[in-house]
Image (cartoon, rainbow, N blue to C red):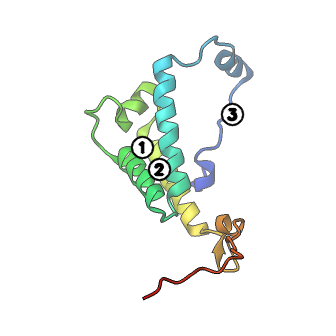
Amino acid sequence: MENSPGRLFEGDVIAPDQYLEIFTRSNNLEPEQELVLAILTDAIDCILKFCDEPVSMRAKLFSDAHDWIFAQDGREPFSFLNVCEILNFDPSYLRRGIKAKMQAKLVRGPVHIAGMPMRMSRIRPRVSSVPRSRPRL
C-alpha cells in the first residue's frame, strides 16, 4: 500500500449493497452528530485554508483550530477526541491526514505573479486622482 499524502483521504471501494445501505437511510446523522461534524469541518477548513497565511485574524483561526485538533485532552464535551468518538472517527487517522495536507500545501507554497501572492494579484490598488495633501508643520 502506498503511503502518499494524496491517497490518505481517498474514498474506499464499497459494494453496491453497502452503498444502498448508507444512502437509503432516512437520516444518516442525528442532529447532535451533525453539530459536531460541522465543528470538525470548520476546524479542518481553518487549518487547511490558513496554514500558510500570516494575516493576524487568519493566523488566530489557524492557531485555535490547530490547538483544538492536536490537543490530547478529552475532558471538554466538544474536544476533538470526543467529537471523533461521537462520529466514530479515528482521531489519529484524521490528524495524520491533516498534517500531510498541511505539509503538501506548505511545500507547494503560494503562487506568485509579479511579486504578489495569487490572491492579491487579482486586487487592483486604488489609484486616487486627487493628490494627497501633506500635513503642514
Residue at numbered disc 1: 92
Alpha carbon distance from label 2 to label 1: 6 Å
**Residue at (69% x, 13% y) in the render:** 24
Q: Residue 107: give x, y in percent of width and height.
A: 57, 68
The residue tagged with tag 2: helix, strand or loop?
helix
* The C terminus - image quarter: bottom left
The residue under label 2 is which amino acid type? Arg
How dense is the environment of label 2, judged by Cα within 10 Å: few (below 14), some, or many (20 and up)?
Answer: few
**Residue at (54% x, 53% y) in the render:** 48
**Residue at (52% x, 63% y) in the render:** 52
The residue under label 3 is which amino acid type? Val
Of callouts 2 and 3, the N-terminal one: 3
Left or right? Give the position of 79 relative to 123: left
The residue under label 1 is which amino acid type? Ser
Q: Residue 101: give x, y in percent of width and height.
A: 55, 55
Residue at numbered disc 2: 96
Name the foreground residue: 59 vs 81.
59
The residue tagged with tag 1: helix, strand or loop?
helix
The reply to whether dot 2 and dot 1 touch (C-beta < 8 Å) is yes
Alpha carbon distance from label 2 to label 3: 21 Å
Dot label at residue 13: 3
**Relative to residue 6, is residue 113 depicted above or below?**
below
Alpha carbon distance from label 3 to label 1: 22 Å
